[in-house]
């Protein structure tokens, strides 16, 4: 005990207050965040099981029902199903009224397979392959993903673009409504990495007499053709398959160029090249649309965007987190102006940027070609090769 501390307990309290860590000795911090993360694994797989077993569709079909009634409908064990239903209640996806279960509005809207806003198909594919998460520590140690999705893009993107179509179509429809595509007939749109073409089809629906050039890889472009055919737009569409870094693109031809959820897998250099290609393709006064799940500039205020960045790091050869500062910088560096950020549906943010009428053509190098089986995976993110 030092001479100036006759009351050691008081002294201890005061010094902790000064050091900014009061209470630590006798009131430990909560373990809830750690348990929350551990149990997050089980929560995710419970949701996957719910979708796989048809719990949400089955409950929609039966209406308010007991676990036993739903078990008969789904041909599963009632005892086991009840445990799953109780978990889904704690997640806010089912309501429990006495012994009955019913869908919450969230489940009804997003987890029933035939809903206009369904995310049911997305649940399994959105995180990427499970083994990439099991190897995350190794990925961070090595600075590269062992099996990036780019090794077999068709196998990964086929299910993904089908699962994500309802969500992106809603985002595109609402964006068009807010920026007025219906007031501009005859728009010419170029959709790069279009998937099932939710963005192009929203323009085609809203702008009378509009036309679209739709690009994606061989093996995925057929899915775009299928959706555009189902929507009755085939006549107004040219399909242009191939790597969006390498296909021929006319200069100063399009009123709208869309980069919908492609930049976050491309890394800095390739994203900048894509944006420059897009700007070259725009007519003066045309608009570039960059939709993605962005993070805030401090990378801590928008956990959704940060988690999306980690998902890209875990699964892709070059992808990662995109901040607004980064993307806004790419747009201004390419000479675009009047840049607006909109959020047509939750989390799904969209930059709309104008090409000035007097923009000089920019000189740009094409990037290396798409990662193929002949070209080895890069060993570090975005390393110059
Ligand atoms: C996340 S999906 C987005 C699809 C759609 N744009 C949307 O917003 O829903 C990314 C798409 O980019 C395509 N893609 C990835 N790399 C590409 C490349 N090098 N050339 C052309 N398409 C590519 C994928 O096949 C996939 O369809």
Image (spheres, rainbow, N blue to C red):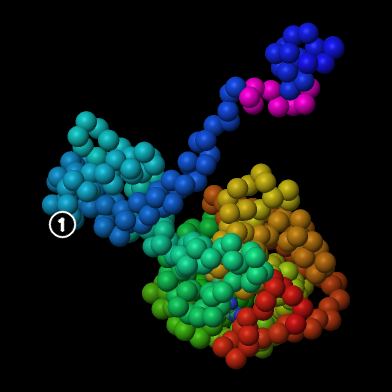
Using residue 299 as the reference point, say whether residue 182 is left or right of it. left
Where residue 74 appears, x then y in whole percent? 18, 55
Using residue 250 as the reference point, say whether residue 191 is left or right of it. left
Where residue 115 appears, x then y in whole percent? 35, 56
- Closest to the observer: 27 or 163? 27
Task: Give, as a single range, the part of the protein colored magenta.
Answer: 17-25
Residue at 26% x, 52% y is: 55
- Locate the N terminus and report the quarter of the image it occupies: top right
Residue at 74% x, 9% y is: 7
Q: Mark 1 — residue?
A: 75
- Tell me, yes or no, whether the highlighted magenta stretch contains residue 240: no
Q: Which residue is most to the top?
A: 6
Measured along the vertical axis of the image, is residue 62 above or below residue 196?
Answer: above
- Locate the C terminus and report the quarter of the image it occupies: bottom right
**Residue 25 visible in the current orientation:** yes
- Which element type, helix, strand or loop, lies under badge 1? loop
Measured along the vertical axis of the image, is residue 260 above or below residue 277?
Answer: above
- Closest to the observer: 182 or 302? 302
């Amino acid at each position: 005990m030092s001479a100036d501390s006759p009351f050691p307990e008081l002294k201890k309290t005061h010094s902790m207050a000064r050091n900014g860590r009061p209470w630590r000795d006798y009131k430990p911090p909560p373990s809830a965040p750690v348990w929350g993360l551990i149990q997050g694994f089980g929560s995710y797989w419970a949701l996957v099981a719910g979708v796989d077993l048809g719990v949400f569709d089955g409950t929609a079909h039966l209406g308010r029902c007991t676990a036993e009634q739903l078990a008969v409908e789904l041909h599963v064990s009632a005892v086991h199903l009840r445990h799953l239903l109780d978990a889904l209640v704690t997640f806010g996806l089912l309501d429990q009224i006495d012994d009955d279960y019913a869908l919450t509005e969230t489940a009804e809207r997003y987890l029933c397979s035939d809903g206009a806003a369904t995310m049911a198909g997305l649940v399994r594919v959105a995180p990427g392959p499970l083994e990439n998460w099991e190897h995350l520590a190794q990925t961070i140690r090595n600075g590269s993903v062992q099996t990036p999705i780019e090794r077999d893009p068709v196998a990964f993107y086929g299910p993904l673009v089908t699962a994500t179509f309802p969500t992106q179509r809603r985002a595109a429809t609402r964006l068009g409504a807010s920026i007025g595509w219906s007031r501009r007939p005859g728009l010419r749109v170029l959709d790069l990495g279009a998937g099932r073409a939710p963005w192009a089809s929203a323009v085609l629906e809203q702008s009378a007499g509009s036309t679209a050039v739709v690009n994606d890889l061989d093996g995925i472009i057929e899915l775009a053709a299928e959706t555009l055919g189902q929507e009755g737009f085939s006549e107004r569409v040219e399909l242009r398959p191939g790597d969006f870094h390498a296909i021929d693109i006319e200069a100063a031809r399009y009123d709208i160029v869309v980069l919908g959820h492609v930049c976050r897998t491309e890394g800095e250099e390739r994203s900048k090249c894509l944006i420059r290609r897009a700007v070259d393709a725009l007519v003066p006064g045309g608009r570039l649309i960059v939709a993605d799940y962005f993070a805030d500039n401090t990378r801590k205020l928008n956990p959704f965007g940060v988690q999306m960045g980690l998902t890209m790091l875990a699964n892709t050869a070059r992808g990662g987190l995109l901040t607004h500062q980064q993307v806004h910088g790419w747009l201004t560096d390419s000479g675009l102006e009047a840049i607006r950020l909109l959020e047509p549906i939750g989390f799904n943010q969209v930059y709309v940027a104008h090409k000035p009428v007097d923009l000089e053509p920019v000189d740009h190098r094409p990037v290396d070609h798409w990662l193929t089986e002949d070209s080895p995976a890069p060993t570090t993110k975005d390393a110059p090769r």
